Amino acid sequence: MNSLELTSRQKEIIEIVKINGPVTGDSIGQKLLLTRSALRTDFRILVELGYIESKPKKGYIFKTDNIKSKMLINTDIEVKDIMSPSVSVEESISIHETIVMMFSKDVGSIFVTSGKFLKGIVSRKDLLKVVMGKIDTEKTPVSLVMTRVPNVIFTEKNDKIRDAVKKLIEHQIDSMPVIEKNGNNYEVIGRITKTNIAKLFLEIFQ
């Protein structure tokens, strides 16, 4: 069952618990003009799915610390909740040094920055093309082969995960920088990858 399959009554129960918890089943019933026994099945389903928790002698509480509950209720998990540290190099770094960094960090792409600001991105595929050519990788800066801003696909820390996933799929990319806008510049604060998404779903379904 996901958020789209919840009944309107179950959604009302979640909101009541979220706002008033801990709250007893009787109190919830009074707000919905129903008896506690009439809501017993709804309570059981919501507890089993991790939306709410039953506390002895206290009533029901909203499980705010449960990432699974957050996803199931309204899929409002944000990028900042699951993003990884960024992996980046300065734009003056050579292609050779970038390749070494990429394999030492075991990543599929590296962000290219000037200080803390995003300038571009380079992938393994980009670097493979360069290595197969006649470019001197030890003398050529990575900035010459990177995809430059504003052509870099990025996400922001408060974006919803569902929106980040759409970007990954639509643009057929494995990762994106997580940025904070600073005037006309983009400060890199993390990365979101398909691996992050896979780990999230693994946690949800465990």
Image (cartoon, rainbow, N blue to C red):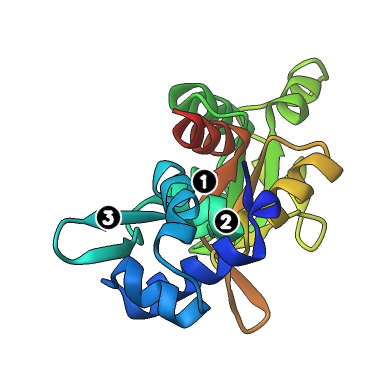
Q: Which residue is identified by label 1?
A: 88
Q: Marks 1 and 3: which is nearer the front? A: 3
| SS type, badge 1 | strand
Q: CA distance from mark 2 to mark 3?
A: 49 Å
- Sequence-wise, which precedes: disc 1 or disc 2? 1
Q: Is residue 134 left or right of residue 31?
A: right
**Residues at circles 1 and 2 in contact by the CB criterion of under 8 Å:** yes
In which quadrant of the rendered view does residue 48 lie? top left
Q: Which residue is identified by label 2?
A: 113
Q: How many marks?
A: 3
Residue 15 x %, y %: 49, 73
Residue under the point 14% across and 63% down: 57
| SS type, badge 3 | strand
The N terminus lies in quadrant: top right
Q: Amino acid at mark 2?
A: Thr
Q: Amino acid at mark 3?
A: Ser
Q: Amino acid at mark 1?
A: Ser
Residue under the point 49% across and 32% down: 199
Q: CA distance from mark 1 to mark 2?
A: 7 Å
Residue under the point 76% across and 25% down: 125
Q: Is residue 100 above or below residue 31?
A: above
The C terminus lies in quadrant: top left
Q: Is residue 95 above or below residue 83?
A: above
Which is nearer the eye, 175 or 69?
69
Which is nearer the eye, 108 or 96?
108
Q: Which residue is identified by label 3?
A: 54
Residue 201 x %, y %: 55, 35
In which quadrant of the rendered view does residue 62 lie? bottom left
